[in-house]
Image (cartoon, helix red, strand yellow):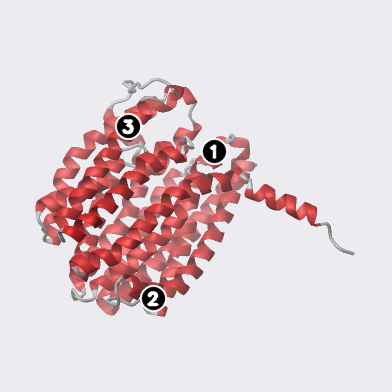
Amino acid sequence: MTSDPAPRQGRARKAIGHELVRRSFLFSLSIILSTLVGVVSIPVLIGQLGDTTWARLAVLQSIAQFLAVVVGFGWGATGPSTVASLAVAERKGFFATSLLARLVILVPVLAAGTFIAALLVGVDPLVAALVSLTAVAPAAAAGWYFIGTNRPVALFLFDALPAILGQAAALVGVLIAPSLLMYASCTAAFAVLGLLASCLFVATRSADGPWKIDRTQSLRGLLRDQLPGFTATFTTSLLTTLPVVIVQVIVPASALPLFVLADRLSRYAGLVLAPILQAIQSWVPEAGREHITSRGRIAMLVACGIGAVGAIGMITCAPWVSPLLSQGAIAIPLLIAVVMGFGFAGEAISQVTGLAVLVTIGRSRELALSAGVATGSALLGVLVGTLLFGVPGALVALALTSIGLAIYRSRTALRGLAAQGS
């Protein structure tokens, strides 16, 4: 007796047509193009600038990303879920208020960050300023607002496309005149253009309510409300900034490119997760509180699946992709690739569970606490691991931290969802 394939085909069509799948696909278009341009840039920059200069640029970019987190002040983490749950008429006012706060933060952070970055990395202050501006401008833009309001096309046009065009222009510029100043000037120009265009787009969306800054709350009160989200992203950003700085100080200059390339490949693998996270952040809360429990559990299952697939891909691809991208200058051993794979799986689960589930069920405090503890543990582990075992020790410490964070956040989320459904 043969089973009827029709029900299975119907379920397959239903799964493919699921709103979460459709939304993830739309958001992924931006990520795919950004990843391709980023991957292509590695051999070009190494070939034109040398692997040591490329590694120093990567350190500078890591510091700039840390500055971007300070400017964003948590809106990138909690903003999508918050704006998705607001009444449509209140959304533009929410963005306008946050924009004012972020612009106030941007100026002093950019000035101080430029000085510190130039001093730590040993580059021209103008280069440090431009690289920092490239990172902080999108942090003041509307990327998270487009995610929360389910506008993947706007996210691509005003967030991803300026970065892609800036990177492409920078690569052409470096081929013509190989210098960090040429590269940084091109990326900074397009980043500022993206900031201005995204804010103009939001301001002209009449369906989102009036452009009105909330005067009922002081700037200090507004930033205080953002502290849980900021703490979570701030402490997490330390994991993307300080490890490479620690490794740079401890290991010989010739060993730094191996860590930087492993870090870059892990980040590009993390971009696979980004469209899923972006879709889930708006999908989990938007159907109302009665659906949060079921949607939260689905989100966690999706994260586990992405983590498993990504880990297998990392272990399989990193050893042969690394010499290809670095023109034979850098090769990632299989054991390090295994460590990177497990680290990615932990990152996938902890990010989705934390930013899409814990925030939605009102557990931002646990999100911030777990991020703080994980960051302290990871940085101590990187310091000790690098001193004892060099680059492999640093990578193992980061992977163990990701796994531990995933376990804690998953247990907390499951308890919270159970309480939500009771």
| N-term mark: 3 or 1 | 3
**Amino acid type at image mark 3:** Cys
Element type at mark 3: helix
Instruction: Evaluate if marks 1 and 2 touch, with contact meaning CB atoms under 8 Å apart.
Output: no
Residue 254 coordinates in the image, percent (x, y): 20, 76
Indicate the quadrant where residue 72 lies. Answer: top left
Q: Is residue 135 above or below residue 104?
A: below
Q: Label 2, on which residue?
A: 336
Residue placed at 27% from the left, 45% from the top?
A: 70
Within 10 Å of disc 2 (Cα), the crowding (few <14, some 14-19, many 20+) is some
Residue 325 coordinates in the image, percent (x, y): 33, 70
Residue placed at 14% from the left, 46% from the top?
A: 112
**Residue 285, label in figure:** 1
Residue placed at 37% from the left, 24% from the top?
A: 204
Residue 230 coordinates in the image, percent (x, y): 34, 44
Report how far apart the C-alphas of labels 2 and 3 lie in the structure: 42 Å
Residue lying at the far right in this picture: please name it: 1
Within 10 Å of disc 3 (Cα), the crowding (few <14, some 14-19, many 20+) is some
Residue 75 seen by the camera: no
Indicate the quadrant where residue 239 lies. Answer: bottom left
| N-term mark: 1 or 2 | 1
Residue 74 coordinates in the image, percent (x, y): 35, 42
**Amino acid type at image mark 2:** Ile
| Front position in the image: 123 or 31 | 31
**Residue 199, label in figure:** 3
**Residue 50, label in figure:** none
| N-term mark: 2 or 3 | 3
